[in-house]
Image (spheres, rainbow, N blue to C red):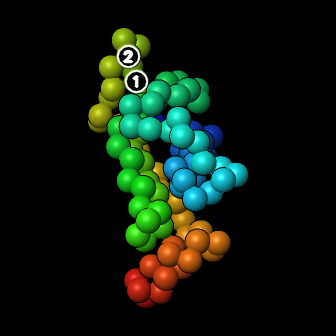
């Protein structure tokens, strides 16, 4: 199985909804265990949300098979890039240079 550009785009879009400091994008329904559909169903396996420390948001997602079982042989790690309106995110990027 390969992932389409559309699927990668959707994963990327969803990870930006994890930041509780972003009133416009934050989605409190995006939690570990959430199932969502793009072309097929996916489950959020793990979320890492560090808005309180370094501004990082990431999630691991995997597709569900026909029976609803998670296919962990096809895990995608999606993460947010630098958010220029988040001071902690910018400070963290400076430290990593």
Q: Does residue 18 appear to the left or right of 67 in the view shown?
A: right
Circle 2 residue: 68
Local crowd size for mark 1, using a 10 Å CA cut-off: few (<14), some (14–19), many (≥20): some
Question: How far across and how far down the image is residue 31, in percent?
Answer: 44, 38
Question: How far across and how far down the image is residue 47, in percent?
Answer: 39, 47
Residue 97's place in the image compared with 38, above or below, is below
Quarter holding residue 8: top right
The one nearer the camera, 35 or 67, is 35
Q: In which quarter of the image is the C terminus?
A: bottom left
**Helix, strand or loop at disc 2?**
loop
Residues marked 2 and 1 touching at CB (< 8 Å): yes
Tell me if I can see residue 1 in this picture. Answer: no
Mark 2 to mark 1: distance in Å? 5 Å
The image's mark for residue 51 is none
The image's mark for residue 64 is 1
The one nearer the camera, 16 or 78, is 16
The residue positioned 60% from the left and 48% from the top of the image is 26
Residue 85's place in the image compared with 67, above or below, is below
**Helix, strand or loop at disc 1?**
loop
The one nearer the camera, 64 or 22, is 22
Question: How far across and how far down the image is residue 21, in percent?
Answer: 58, 59
Tell me if I can see residue 78 in this picture. Answer: yes
The residue positioned 47% from the left and 27% from the top of the image is 35
Q: Does residue 18 appear to the left or right of 26 in the view shown?
A: left
Local crowd size for mark 2, using a 10 Å CA cut-off: few (<14), some (14–19), many (≥20): few
The residue positioned 42% from the left and 55% from the top of the image is 49
The residue positioned 33% from the left and 26% from the top of the image is 70
Q: Quadrant of the N terminus?
A: top left
Question: How far across and how far down the image is residue 58, in percent?
Answer: 43, 54
């Amino acid at each position: 199985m390969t992932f389409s550009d559309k699927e990668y785009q959707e994963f990327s879009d969803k990870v930006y909804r994890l930041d509780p400091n972003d009133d416009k994008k934050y989605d409190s329904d995006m939690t570990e265990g959430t199932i969502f559909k793009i072309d097929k169903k996916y489950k959020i396996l793990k979320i890492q949300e560090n808005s309180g420390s370094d501004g990082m948001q990431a999630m691991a997602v995997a597709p569900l098979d026909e029976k609803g079982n998670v296919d962990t042989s096809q895990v995608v790690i999606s993460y947010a890039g630098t958010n220029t309106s988040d001071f902690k995110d910018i400070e963290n990027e400076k430290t990593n240079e």
